[in-house]
């Protein structure tokens, strides 16, 4: 059975991951391969999307709210951090567009 | 025949808000079914009516009785903003309250209209926080039962 890092490495090989840049506040940018979804979400009669990034937790040490994330040329900040989600060893970041 | 009084009230409130040059500008909508577009600009305002109740007077003959119609008009301000959508909503809400209060008969379409309450909703489930401020106006109008487009 693959561990989380091996799973993401397989994802890179299969071309299902996305290249992202994580920039901790006051830190230097770090390139990581992530899973990224940006599903349509209508709230209070207003259209929107729900950007969520997933990556192995070991690749996001000390990630914090407010850190910068760039995916597909769009800039986000980390709005919320869900550790061990959806699987142990994986972190999901809820993003807010800047 | 003119539009039903309910629509006349909505149209009048829209015209009042647009004329007041609020932060929503001309982005004030009645009869909107589909969601507001994601990219704004914000704020935007939607107007709808709901829950009409009717009491019939008995002094006139059947067909011409006076209806007392009471219902709610929801004026809903919408905003999407990465910092403070609630502040945007409260600002445009203030402007709307002032504009509607300054036109006591809503351009002659109502006998009675009062802000009955407000509700603020905020959500982070989008690429930027989304908020909605519902300003619920209670409206009372009178019409003959055979002329729902004419204020009595």
Image: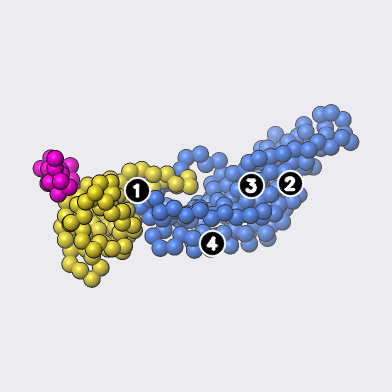
* Horizontal side, residue B130 vs residue B143: left or right: left
Q: Tell me the magenta residue range.
A: A1-19
Q: Earlier in the sequence, mark 3 or mark 4?
A: 3
Secondary structure beneath label 3: strand
State the CA–CA distance, disc 4 to disc 2. 26 Å
Secondary structure beneath label 4: helix
Can you tell which mark lies on residue B140?
2
Colour yellow maps to chain = A
Task: List the single residue furthest toward the left.
Answer: A13
Q: Are marks 4 and 2 in contact (CB under 8 Å)?
A: no
Residue A68 placed where, x, y %? Answer: 26, 62
User: What residue is rendered at 12% in x and 46% in y?
Assistant: A6
Residue that carries the numbered disc 4 in the rendered image: B90
Residue B62 placed where, x, y %? Answer: 84, 28
Q: Which marked residue is nearer to the observer: mark 1 or mark 4? A: 1
State the CA–CA distance, disc 3 to disc 1. 31 Å
Is disc 1 surrounded by few (<14), some (14 to 19) or many (20+) residues within 10 Å?
many
State the CA–CA distance, disc 3 to disc 4. 18 Å
Establish whether labels 4 and 2 are both on one chain.
yes
Chain where mark 3 sits: B
Colour blue maps to chain = B
State the CA–CA distance, disc 2 to disc 1. 41 Å
Q: Are marks 1 and 4 in contact (CB under 8 Å)?
A: no
Q: Earlier in the sequence, mark 4 or mark 2?
A: 4
User: What residue is rendered at 49% in x and 60% in y?
Assistant: B86
Residue that carries the numbered disc 1 in the rendered image: A50
Residue that carries the numbered disc 3 in the rendered image: B73
């Amino acid at each position: 059975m693959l561990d989380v890092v091996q799973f993401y490495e397989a994802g890179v090989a299969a071309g299902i991951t996305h290249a992202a840049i994580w920039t901790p506040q006051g830190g230097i940018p770090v390139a990581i391969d992530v899973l990224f979804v940006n599903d349509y979400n209508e709230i209070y009669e207003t259209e929107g999307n729900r950007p969520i990034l997933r990556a192995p937790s070991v690749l996001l040490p000390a990630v914090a709210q407010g850190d910068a994330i760039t995916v597909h040329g769009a800039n986000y900040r980390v709005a919320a951090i869900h550790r061990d989600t959806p699987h142990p060893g994986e972190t999901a970041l809820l993003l807010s567009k800047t | 025949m003119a539009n039903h009084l309910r629509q006349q009230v909505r149209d009048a409130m829209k015209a009042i808000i647009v004329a007041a040059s609020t932060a929503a500008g001309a982005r004030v909508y009645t009869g909107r079914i589909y969601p507001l577009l994601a990219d704004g600009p914000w704020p935007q305002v939607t107007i709808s009516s709901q829950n009409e109740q009717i009491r019939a007077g008995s002094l006139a003959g059947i067909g011409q009785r006076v209806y007392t119609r009471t219902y709610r008009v929801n004026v809903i301000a919408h905003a999407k903003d990465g910092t403070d959508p609630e502040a945007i909503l409260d600002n445009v809400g203030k402007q709307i309250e002032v504009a509607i209060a300054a036109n006591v008969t809503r351009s002659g379409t109502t006998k009675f209209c009062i802000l009955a309450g407000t509700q603020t909703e905020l959500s982070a489930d989008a690429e930027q926080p989304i908020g909605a401020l519902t300003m619920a106006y209670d409206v009372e109008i009178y019409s003959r039962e055979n002329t729902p487009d004419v204020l009595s």
